[in-house]
Each structure stands twice: as structure tokens, then as C-alpha cells.
Image (tube, grey):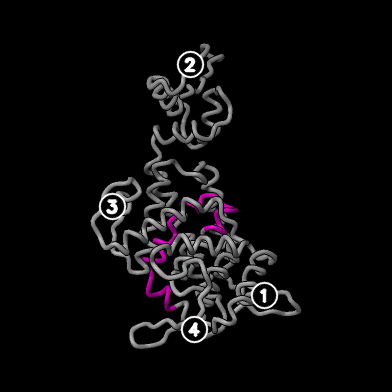
Amino acid sequence: MIVSNDSIMKPPYDITTKILKLLTSISEKLGEVNAIHIDRPSPELRKRNRVKTIHASLEIEGNTLTEDQITAIIENKRVIGPKKDIQEVLNAIAVYELLPKLNPSSLKSFLKAHKILMKDLINRPGELRNKSVGIVKGIEVAHIAPPYENLPYLMKDLFGYLKTDEDPILIKSCVVHYEIEFIHPFIDGNGRMGRLWQTLMLMKTYPVFEYLPFETIIKERQETYYEVLSICDKQGKLTIFIEFILEAVYESLSSLLDIQNRIFTSKNRIEYFLETYKGEDFSRKDYMNMFKDISSSTASRDIKSAVDKKTIKKVGDKRMTRYKIVKK
């Protein structure tokens, strides 16, 4: 649905007051995320959110496995369930592990991701479809995808827009998500790829999106998600889809901040500090500079706990006190 004017590709949407407000609100939330250093969450939160993302994205497509079962698969534990559902989870885990190495502007990366995501689920994973397809909801045809003969230039246009257009990344990622759904480049896995590619695009600018389960919000509003896609299809504009996805992103960021405020314990802070601090020794002030919302007494308790556990060791006394990270 990308239209061209003198070779300059323009996505068919309007900037509404709602979109502007959501962009502002999301930017504020991202500022909060950076301020309290959860742009790269603790390993515990990272794992929990990855499970939620995989569960939500696959449940939208009919997967029956629970979050607990997905967690067990990640931990290499035996799980009893439909073979297809387990394969879908294994594939999703593999592609999310690879995510940091993929290039969102590369069609080659896009096809590689689909090949991993749909391994042993369809014939010719990672290849553009070679026949016409439609999406049926109930007894009605909800969407007829463009003819497969048009796919080469449609994908060229899409990735050209992705590479060259100066739209804000928050909007551009929504446009690409929608266009993947609309173009339907594969026999199956298009919904998963649309959501995955938006995540990839966003995380390259905002690392927190690698672990932000905004797909959970989409799953909770699955009927609305498909309804919005259908309306945009009929209108020939994706304005309300952008509004819908930006709302999901905003609510997911708000939820992440709420959860982090509840569970960011002394152990989490120490783990995060040791993961991210670049020097070999530090002061209490250095520690507090990373966690600006904690008191000096809380910082002292965190550091004492780490010293007691021999994760760090104390050097010097009083104002000269420093702490060295114990190398494992």
C-alpha cells in the first residue's frame, strides 16, 4: 500500500492529534526508562519479558502452550504438548536470540528471520510465496493479498521506504508492521514477522524494545487488532493502525515501569551495576549515580550485601573507601 511520487515513497497515513500525543507520551516514558537504567533490564526481567513476548505473539496465531511451558522449553526442560506448538516456540526462541545480529533494513535478514521462525512448519520457509493467498475470517474473506507476481517490487519498495524515509522510527516501525501484514509476502508467518520486524526496528534505536512485551497488549486486544487492519485495508490508509500500535507501546512501557518499581530489588541493582559498570573500582557515589532514585542508606545496604557475598571487596576507609569488582 506504499504509494510512490517521483520515486519518493510516502506511506498512506495522516498525522493526527492522537498520534502526536502518543509520540510525546512514549518519548517521556522512554526518558524514564533511561533515567532508572532499565533500557537493558536485569537478566530476570529480561527472561520474563521474552517469555511474555513469545507467548503473546504465538497465542495470537493459535499456539496453546502456556508461559510456564515456554519457560520450561527455554530452560531445556521436557514439555508435553502439540509437536507443532513446541516447534513454534523453539523457532521463536532461536529468532529472538538472533535478533541483535539482524539488519532491519535488509531483505536478506528478513528472509533469514522467516526461515528460522517457520522452520519445519511450512514448505520453503524464508522464501516469498509463489501463489496468491487470501485471509479468511469465519466465512468471509477478510483480505486478498497482492498477486505474488508483484512481490519483488512491493518488497523492494517497502525496504526502500525503510532505508530512506525520514519518518520517526516509532511511526516507521508501525508502517512496516502494517505493510508486512498487507503485502503478505509469505504463505504463513506474516503476522509473526510483522510484529517481529517492528520490534527489531525499534530496538536498534531503543534497546529496551528487545525485552518489551508490547505484543501482550496486542494479544489482549486481538479482535480490535484484526478489525483495525481490516478498516485500514478498506480505507487505503493506516492512520488508525499507527494509533492502535502506539497505544500498545505506551501501555507496555507504563507496565514495564510499574513492574520495575515493584521488583527492582537490591540483588537486581547489584547485578545490573556489575553487568554495566565499566571501571574496576567504584565509590558509593558512583553507585548512586546509576540509581538516582535510591537513598544513600539504601546504597550502603546494597553495597554491604555485595561485600558480604564477596561479589565486591572494600578497599580503604571512610572518605577514601572504594569497592573493587571481584573477577570470577
Please, what secondary structure does the residue beneath circle 1 have? strand
Q: Nearer the viewer, mark 2 or mark 4?
A: 4
Residue carrying label 2: 314
List the residue tagged with mark 4.
132
What whole-number distance in Å separates the C-alpha atoms at marks 1 and 3? 43 Å
Identify the residue position indicated by label 1 in the image.
10
As measured in the structure, the alpha-carbon distance from the residue carrying label 1 to the one carrying label 4 is: 26 Å
C-beta proximity under 8 Å, tags 1 and 3: no
For the record, the magenta segment spans: 200-227
Instruction: Check disc 2 and give the amino acid type.
Output: Lys
Residue at the image point whose x is 57% and y is 80% from the top? 237
Near-viewer residue (61 or 123): 123
Q: Against 50, is 216 above or below?
A: below
User: Which callout, 1 or 3, points at the residue further toward the start of the chain?
Assistant: 1
Magenta: predominant secondary structure element? helix
Percent x, y of residue 200: 54, 57
The image's mark for residue 68 is: 3
- The stretch drawn in magenta includes residue 239: no
- Indicate which label's residue lies in the foreground, 1 or 3: 3
Q: Please state the horizontal and vertical placement of residue 141, each as a whole percent of the image.
A: 41, 87
Please state the total of marks drawn on the protein image.
4
Relative height, residue 275 to residue 108 (above, below)? above
The three-letter amino acid code for the residue at tag 3 is Asp
Label 4: which secondary element: loop
Which of pointers 3 and 2 indicates the residue nearer the eye?
A: 3
Above or below for 186 versus 308: below
Mark 4 or mark 2, which is nearer the start of the sequence? 4
